């Protein structure tokens, strides 16, 4: 990566108005292509060092409480949240293409991890860690494989309403899973709706620990109050104050408040997460769900910061970087990780210049584990719940959904369906439903596309949809038919039916049908056979089938399929005007005779 191409400060030239692709041709097949962090190091400026170190230390103040909180929210001991912070940051610093993106445990994944870990671990923390680590490995393998196969475009298949739907559902799931901890009691999580009932029942049965709730609610309020100040580590301040209060008054004993307890001393070690064969399918499903969510989030965040810093980030390399970081987490006692929309802005506001910021943050967390493992032993669970709840609230998207409701209500209700799926079925099943809905939505547009009969509208050049221009004139004996989609197996029969229907409904006997085929970007074998059948059907009725504005690649396919020979080269015209002209030459029509009426 050439920093002079991406760093405005590195060049005296005027600021670029477009994103620049930093990888030069000489790097495309070299080892450096796969290690963007080393490319940055080759051109590293000493002026950046102080900013990266300061930003890394500031970032570490947020990494610790958030890492612990998300581990607990995922059904794991808090120390593993720090393990899942250290190794991924170090790996991403080498393999990740984004210069300031921060990876680590994330609230958007907590519900998915918990949905796998909680029922399978049966309360055994060792087994829970192994299950979560296996999920991270599955996610890592999927992401790296997709990146190598250049499938970075896959998440673009999820429309914005669908993404909002499943993320809102996950946010609700995470929030409801933490409310009992905020209130000072516990429930057996069985899905958002059942959790809500269990919370209400717990409150009615007077199980609330009001001291724990006061500490948790105060922590939550402090986080939101301090959130507006980017340079102030609001989460750290809120958590430290809560920890100090609990420790000073020994509230763990006197008030029965649940606390984190001492952390084990030691760094993450290489360990293969062995799981039972009976758990494998569930873990694979969970890993796939994690891969989908984490890359969708990472891709959006990475592109946002790329645009802001005038850099180019390869989405396929982003997949590889995310996958490698997840593999590192899985093999070093961690759990699935993603990019962070809360920690990355902290790094940016603190002045981060390169991936070294993440390295400094990871080393600071490692030093804390080694030198002061008991520092957070009085950290109350209700304060950790407040950290997760604050993050979960940030996941909700309401404003843009209301905009979508105003613009196109069916997409809004599609989002609500995805939301309901996650809220009722659970995180993993709900995400699977969202993917299925996305595929159906994608296919539906091509399966039942728009089509139109075209006519000459008064005062407008060209030929246009007669339903949009009711006064458009039709040429007697000629049907101009436009099909606004590729032709493939799912819509070929509909194409044939609509063409025949257009000919049958013509106000004058039809001699030619001309398909305005500019929107047709592809034809498969099934559609080609239907076209051949349509040509025979029309020919038996004395009607000639022709095409106008057919793209050359599609025309090449028709040649391979034999249709070019069947229809004849004279049936293909470069423009609609040429087709109309050819028809009028063969069947002269006085313009005064053009029919002004149409179905």
Image (cartoon, rainbow, N blue to C red):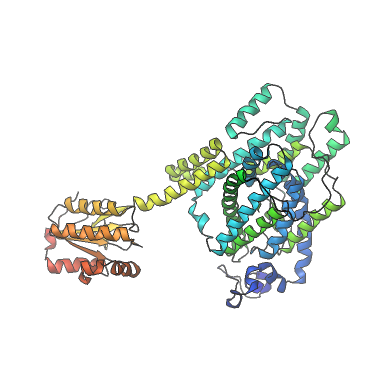
Q: Is residue 66 visible?
A: yes
Instruction: Determine the image quadrant of residue 211.
Output: top right
Q: Return the x and y of residue 78 as percentages of the image width and height.
A: 76, 44
Q: Residue at x 85, y 39 (%)?
A: 244
Q: Return the x and y of residue 15 as percentages of the image width and height.
A: 61, 70
Q: Is residue 349 visible?
A: no
Front-lying residue, 275 or 506: 275
The answer to whether 426 is drawn above or below residue 198 in the figure is below
The answer to whether 101 is drawn above or below residue 174 in the figure is below
Q: Residue at x 78, y 34 (%)?
A: 258
Q: Residue at x 61, y 33 (%)?
A: 190
In this rendering, position of residue 231 left or right of residue 22: right
In this rendering, position of residue 244 left or right of residue 63: right
Residue furthest to the front in view is 277
Q: Return the x and y of residue 547 as percentages of the image width and height.
A: 25, 64
Q: Return the x and y of residue 405 as percentages of the image width and height.
A: 46, 42
Q: Residue at x 22, y 57 (%)?
A: 534
């Amino acid at each position: 990566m050439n920093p002079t191409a991406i760093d405005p400060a590195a060049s005296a030239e005027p600021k670029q108005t477009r994103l620049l692709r930093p990888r030069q041709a000489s790097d495309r097949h070299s080892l450096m292509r796969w290690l963007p962090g080393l490319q940055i190091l080759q051109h590293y400026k000493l002026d950046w060092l102080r900013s990266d170190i300061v930003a890394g230390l500031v970032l570490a103040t947020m990494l610790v409480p958030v890492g612990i909180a998300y581990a607990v929210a995922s059904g794991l001991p808090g120390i593993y949240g720090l393990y899942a912070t250290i190794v991924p940051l170090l790996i991403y610093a080498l393999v990740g293409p984004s210069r300031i993106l921060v990876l680590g445990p994330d609230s958007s994944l907590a519900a998915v991890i918990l949905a796998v870990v909680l029922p399978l671990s049966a309360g055994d923390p060792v087994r829970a860690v192994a299950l979560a680590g296996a999920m991270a490995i599955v996610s890592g393998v999927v992401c790296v494989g997709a990146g190598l196969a250049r499938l970075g475009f896959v998440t673009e298949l999820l429309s914005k309403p669908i993404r909002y739907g499943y993320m809102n559902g996950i946010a609700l799931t995470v929030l409801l899973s933490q409310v009992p901890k905020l209130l000072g009691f516990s429930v057996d999580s069985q899905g958002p709706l059942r959790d809500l009932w269990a919370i209400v029942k717990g409150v009615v049965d007077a199980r609330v620990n009001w001291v724990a709730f006061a500490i948790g609610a105060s922590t939550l309020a402090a986080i939101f109050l301090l959130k507006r100040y980017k340079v102030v580590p609001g989460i750290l301040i809120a958590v430290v104050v809560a920890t100090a209060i609990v420790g000073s008054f020994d509230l763990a004993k006197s008030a029965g408040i649940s606390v984190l307890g001492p952390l084990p001393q030691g760094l993450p070690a290489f360990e293969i997460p062995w799981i039972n064969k009976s758990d494998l399918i569930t873990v694979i499903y969970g890993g796939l769900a994690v891969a989908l969510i984490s890359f969708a989030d990472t891709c959006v965040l990475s592109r946002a910061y790329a645009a802001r810093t005038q850099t180019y980030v390869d989405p396929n390399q982003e997949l590889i970087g995310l996958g490698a970081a997840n593999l590192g987490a899985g093999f070093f006692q961690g759990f699935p990780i993603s990019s962070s929309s809360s920690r990355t802005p902290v790094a940016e506001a603190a002045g981060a210049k390169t991936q070294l910021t993440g390295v400094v943050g990871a080393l600071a967390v490692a030093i804390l584990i080694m030198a002061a493992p008991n520092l957070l032993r009085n950290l109350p669970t209700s304060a950790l719940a407040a950290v997760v709840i604050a993050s979960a609230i940030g996941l909700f998207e309401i404003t843009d959904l209301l905009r979508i409701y105003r613009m196109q209500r069916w997409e809004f209700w599609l989002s609500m369906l995805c939301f309901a799926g996650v809220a009722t079925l659970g995180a993993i099943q709900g995400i699977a439903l969202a993917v299925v809905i996305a595929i159906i939505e994608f296919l539906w547009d091509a399966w039942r596309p728009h089509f139109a009969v075209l006519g000459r509208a008064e005062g407008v050049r060209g030929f246009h949809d007669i339903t949009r221009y009711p006064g458009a004139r039709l040429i007697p004996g000629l049907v101009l038919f436009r099909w606004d989609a590729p032709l493939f197996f799912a819509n070929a029969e509909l194409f044939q039916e609509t063409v025949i229907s257009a000919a049958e409904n013509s106000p004058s006997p039809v001699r030619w049908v001309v398909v305005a085929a500019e929107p047709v970007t592809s034809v498969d074998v099934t559609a080609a056979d239907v076209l051949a059948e349509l040509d025979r059907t029309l020919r038996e009725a004395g009607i000639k089938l022709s095409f106008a504005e057919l793209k050359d690649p599609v025309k090449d396919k028709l040649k391979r399929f034999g249709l070019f020979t069947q229809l004849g080269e004279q049936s293909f015209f470069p423009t609609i005007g040429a087709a109309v002209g050819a028809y009028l030459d063969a069947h002269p029509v006085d313009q005064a005779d053009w029919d002004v009426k149409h179905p």
